Image (cartoon, grey):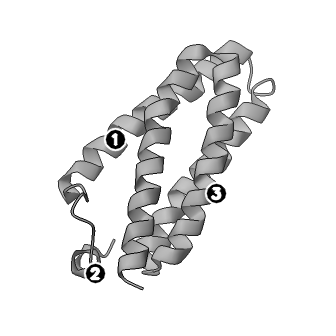
Amino acid sequence: MNLSWYDTLAKPDWTPPSWLFSPVWTLLYIMMTVAALLVWRKKGSLRAAAFPLGLFALQLFFNLIWSPLFFGLRNPGAAMVDLVLLWVALLATVIVFWRISLPAGVLLLPYLLWVSFAGVLNFAIWQMNS
């Protein structure tokens, strides 16, 4: 990741400090893993859990490509498109997980809130640096 480029960008005053991102993402990934395991366990098999875990994999794909788009390509606009796709896929995942296991759905809510905040921040940075 090219943080020196990120440091040169204009950012809103409400941008969290860089050190906060690692612990937040660590906690969110732990919660995401537990949620997926709860759904898998509740469904009883990988085959039975294929649809909800497929949605989970789709949102995870969009999550994983954000950093290369934003930092690697230095393209906040493309990263913003990715965040919109991530948010939609994540919302669908939350709804499906919630219907299968209430705790699994609840575990994904902080992630949905964080991605929503990240989307607003990404948009602001994109606009401020265009």
Q: Is residue 120 above or below residue 52?
A: below
The reply to whether residue 24 is in sight is yes
In the rendered image, residue 68, in percent from the top left (x then y), is placed at 47, 71
- Under mark 3, the amino acid is Leu
Labels 3 and 1: the sequence-earlier one: 1
Nearer to me, 45 or 121? 121
Q: Quadrant of residue 19?
A: bottom left
Disc number for residue 26: 1
In the rendered image, residue 66, in percent from the top left (x then y), is placed at 50, 64
Q: Is residue 71 above or below residue 18?
A: below
Give the structural element (helix, strand or loop) at label 1: helix
For the residues carrying marks 2 and 3, which lies nearer the camera in this image?
A: 3
Quadrant of the snapshot with the N terminus: bottom left
Q: Is residue 20 left or right of residue 108?
A: left
Give the structural element (helix, strand or loop) at label 3: helix
Disc number for residue 5: 2
